[in-house]
Image: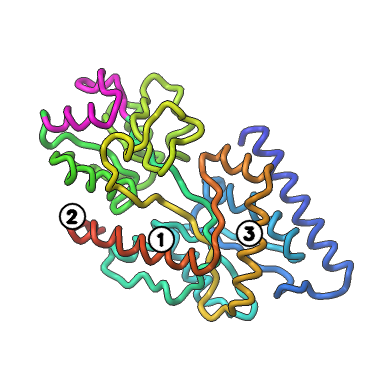
Amino acid sequence: MPGALKKIHQSSRRALLLGAATVLAAGTLPAYGSEVSKLYVGFAAGGATDTLARLIAPALSSELGQSFIVENLPGASGMLAAKAVERSAPQQPSYVLYPTMTMLGKVLAGQNPDLDKITPISLLYEQFTLVVINPQVPGLENVRSLQDLLQVAKAKPGMTYGPMGVGSTGHLTMEWLNSLAGVKMQAVPYKGGSPAMADLLGGHIGVLIADSTVVAPHLKSDKVRAIAVNYPQRMPALPDVPTIQEQGFKEVAGVPWVVLAGPAGMSEAQTATMAKALARVLAKPELVQAMRAQNVEPRSSSPKDAARLMQADLALWSRIIKEKNISN
């Protein structure tokens, strides 16, 4: 773990323990709800989602006067963590960092995403998706834009690319681009970003579409060239790399996000309290800086706006999954 990030984790843990000690010393229950709430992460410790949860938890503890403890339940694209929260009592809820891929995982399996079993509270952050190439792979030496890549793909039907997983937003975005551009790049899905990135660096694949959290640590390599960003604005760390929309595909929308959610049945007062606390947390300059260092964009919202976003993206991505006949 880098030194700066280690210090953030250490200070976060101290703040969490101090917050808990203050509550116990006062001899009263915190105003918001249960004394300790679990904040579930559906991925392994040390990953980007886990790191971000451990940045947010102590700040949220400070805002609400209660402790939030991060617990990892990795597996099934985050669905195990979502299930744990679905079983939580709305009076003393647990919470989950709920990403787009968890919602789409069920769609890909032909199941109902069960959004009625959770209560969306607030958007937490959005992720940049990057289209990158290895310019050392034959045929890609002169590719410097999305249009360049599509021209190569037209000349080489069946050219492959690597998405992070079947049905990932990167996979669906590239299939959408295939349709719009009239090309037939063939997906070779990976089980996660790390093996996909390793194969790009090794020259086993020439094109990768993945979350910025996976790609960013390798951008200084001469084997990685970013050619497009899927986001409404350019990525702050890559101001010279244009968005997909800037490169002629204004129809392409939808970016991966993470929403904070609780169990179904939470009251409007509970969700409003949490959402307002998160808005204050996500406005803190030090937290904004720490989250952007992880190559995500902090975003807060009302519970209703979070629910609308989830439903809108469910409709969007489900349409592409159906049109392209994609399944696990």
| Quadrant in the picture for the N terminus | top right
Q: Is residue 135 magenta?
A: yes
Q: How far is the residue under mark 1 from the one under mark 2?
A: 19 Å
| Nearer to the camera, 109 or 45 | 109
From the viewer's perspective, is 181 left or right of 200? left
> In the shown orientation, is residue 292 left or right of residue 27?
left
User: How far apart, in angstroms, are the residues tagged by discs 1 and 3?
Assistant: 21 Å
Task: Give SS at disc 2.
Answer: loop
Looking at numbered disc 2 in the image, what kind of residue is underneath it?
A: Lys
**How many residues crowd mark 2 within 10 Å: few (<14), some (14–19), many (20+)?**
few
Query: For this rendering, which residue is in front, 2 or 272?
Result: 272
Point out which mark residue 278 bears: 3
Check if residue 192 falls in the magenta segment.
Answer: no
Question: In front of the other: label 1 or label 3?
Answer: 3
Q: Earlier in the sequence, mark 1 or mark 3?
A: 1
Q: CA distance from mark 2 to mark 3?
A: 37 Å
Total count of labels = 3
- Indicate the quadrant containing the C terminus: top left, top right, bottom left or bottom right: bottom left
Local crowd size for mark 1, using a 10 Å CA cut-off: few (<14), some (14–19), many (≥20): many
Q: Secondary structure at mark 3?
A: helix
Q: Residue at x 56, y 76 (%)?
A: 88
Stretch of the chain drawn in magenta: 133-154
Circle 1 SS class: helix
Q: Amino acid at mark 1?
A: Thr
Mark seen at residue 324: 2
Residue 273: percent from left, percent from top: 66, 69
